[in-house]
Image (tube, coloured by chain):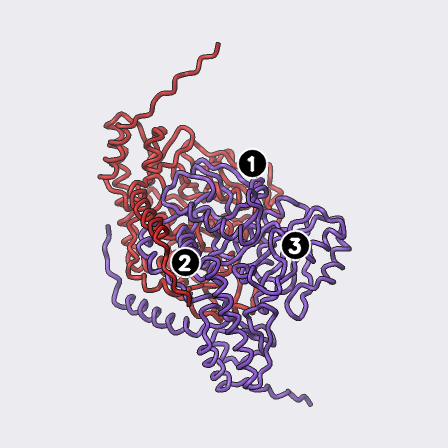
Chain colours: A red, B purple
Amino acid sequence: MIVKELKPEDKDILENLRINLDKNNEFMLGYPVSKDFDYQELIPFFKFPINNVGDPFEEGTNKVQTHFMEREVVSFFAKLFRAEINNYWGYVTNGGSESNLYGLYLGRELYPKAMVYYSDATHYSVRKNIELLNIPSIVIRSQKSGEIDYEDFENVIKLNRHRPAIVLTTFGTTMTEAKDDVSKIKNTLIHYGIQDHYIHCDAALSGSYGVFVEPRVPFDFVDGVDSISISAHKFIGAPIPAGVIITKKSNRDRVAKGVSVIGTLDTTITGSRNGHSVLFLWYALKKYGFEGLKQRYHHSLEVAAYCIQKLETIGIESWKNPGAITVILPRVSNEVILKWQLASQGAISHIICMPNVTKIQIDELINDMVKFPVIEQPVAVHF
Amino acid sequence: MIVKELKPEDKDILENLRINLDKNNEFMLGYPVSKDFDYQELIPFFKFPINNVGDPFEEGTNKVQTHFMEREVVSFFAKLFRAEINNYWGYVTNGGSESNLYGLYLGRELYPKAMVYYSDATHYSVRKNIELLNIPSIVIRSQKSGEIDYEDFENVIKLNRHRPAIVLTTFGTTMTEAKDDVSKIKNTLIHYGIQDHYIHCDAALSGSYGVFVEPRVPFDFVDGVDSISISAHKFIGAPIPAGVIITKKSNRDRVAKGVSVIGTLDTTITGSRNGHSVLFLWYALKKYGFEGLKQRYHHSLEVAAYCIQKLETIGIESWKNPGAITVILPRVSNEVILKWQLASQGAISHIICMPNVTKIQIDELINDMVKFPVIEQPVAVHF
């Protein structure tokens, strides 16, 4: 009804933003975001307010939605994670935080008196989720690799045999892409007689290629988890953050409630839900398929190996976990952190070789590291 | 790297979806979603994985973001809701559920022993939020209009003077667009000496035009709230569900924590955040401005009045709350509910005259109501 043009100064702001994003997008090697997506074909859908409100496996009143695609996406991952054919459920979330919140929420609903256990290498959002859900928790040490310290876990479990346990394992930690072994966790719980337990696997980063990792690290339903979450904007790639949570249908049924205003079941954390992300994800999975995901992973592995080798030629020792696509190196200079947006923590920085990263980019990064070396801080002398 | 075409059968699925959405989108009068948005100019941004991770008022490592626009959007609404100039904060959320969760979370962090009060006309997601946050709560009756029953509220408060109170008021309820009077709530709390209180206003539907409503209903910071949330995909319109939460900066500071991996403060519910919705909202506000929002509201009011008048001509008595754009009528037939996607609850249905709704559409709907009347159920006779 009101057709107004943007003011010239606002048009300039937009244009500058576009130019800046273009530049910054090119130099992003520190965040696990694949940038080689192409959703051109989906642009006509942007005129619809697609809203996947309610349970994707139920039909509601609202018809401007993509529930049937959501069910296909959920089924794809349920199969990938070896969920029981007749006992899985899930939905497309706004990203890792919501997915993990859902997993922990189901755990708490099943075992209201449970203690949550997670390692100190776990994604920072988990602490916030636990706080939101108001559950007591104990942080377990991680090994140098970033993997949970199974001995520390066992020692803590020994002292808490009287409480149900919710364990949040990580399959691809934020800094070192370490993968917690779900079988070992499960065995410890069983060994100490904790039958009331729930394991949620945060596979945000590595879930989409977990099945191709060699040697295999146990992380899925057959290995013993009750729910798994992945991020869609990471390995697969999407303009908008999104995630998937896969859980057992039997657990979801315990929290489902009918809501007449939407004419369906309210089983998801958010009410109105992004139906475009579902469309992106469906489209990407149709295009890539199982084989495409595998090829993407192998490309990433190759670039990661190349990166380690090239770093060695300039005298920098780097390493990566087995099967990982994340290279860990001594903290780089601030100039390099800023330009390449390398996430850095304490003494380390990392380079994540997402499927869009090329050997040419690695070469450029290494040139910059030579150009802007780390300057040793003079030791302060106090008199 | 893998350039694969979509299979012909998948292309067909996409094309059918587009046709269906086009059709269903046209006949949607029961959900509060403005469909007259036009974000064509923003299409070039869809190739960027814009991620507004972290606090919008802090600078992080990731540069592919629209934080500066987010700050402008937050400031616009903070001003509209008469927040203190130097004491507001906020961010763009994934929609009403996340916004309300944030408001309730801040309330709980301030007063961990509080009781939550909300009316039975409150959005269904609030109950879920309260469950997630693990806070005890009491549901207050609502009046026939949908507004909270102030007498019932007072009676309950009288019996709970020993506990801090978190009150969730609604400014535009889901079914009847009723608006709770924040001043009356505040006065009751003060009258009974409950100094430790927090009021969150869920203004998802009516917040964007609340300032134009006559007679004015108290709902903002000057009236006494501690936080307000609105939905962006409702009155303003956006392809993707989004919301805004505005709160007092001093309250946010109490929950802020630094996170090195993103090089910024983690103050939001979700970690990775949708930067495109921020762009949409910034763009819409720049285009509409204060005057544009006012015009949109007046158009809606006019269509709502027209709707009531036309319903009268076919002998159907309908009504609306003062200043509301939602028309309440006796439950229509299932054919009409399905075609026009009219949310219906018990004996009532509603028509929401969003800014995109025209008098022609109202005429068509009324024609359908004549064509598919409600068939009286024969009364069952038992012998």
Subunit bearing disc 1: A
Quadrant in which residue A71 is drawn: bottom left
Identify whether B25 is placed above or below B101: below
Mark 2 vs mark 3: give the one in front. Answer: 2
Residue at left offset 56%, top offset 78%: B308
Residue that badge 1 annotates: A156
Q: How many labels does the image show?
A: 3
Can the viewer see residue B299 in this picture? yes
Q: What element carries label 1?
A: helix
Instruction: Decide if residue B113 is on the left or right side of residue A205.
Output: right
Residue at 63% of width from left, 44% of height from top? Answer: B110
**Vertical placement of B78 versus A383: above or below?**
below
Structural distance between the alpha carbons of marks 3 and 1? 40 Å
What's the amino acid at mark 2?
Lys
Q: Which mark is residue A57?
A: none
Whole-percent x and y of residue B203?
56, 59
Give me the residue at 77% from left, 55% from top.
B158
Question: Label 3 is placed on what type of residue?
Answer: Val
Asked if residue A243 can be seen in this view, the reply is no
**Spatial separation of the CA atoms under disc 2 and disc 3:** 35 Å
* Nearest the eye: A259 or B344: B344
The residue carrying mark 2 is: B287
Q: Do the residues labelled 3 and 1 touch (CB within 8 Å)?
A: no
How far is the residue under mark 1 from the one under mark 2?
A: 58 Å
> Crowdedness of circle 1 by 10 Å Cα count: few (<14), some, many (20+)?
some
Q: Tag 2: Cα neighbours inside 10 Å, few (<14), some, or many (≥20)?
A: some
Pinpoint the chain carrying mark 2.
B
Judge from the rendering whether residue B121 lies leftward or rightward of residue B72; answer left or right: right
Q: Which residue matches tag 3?
A: B167
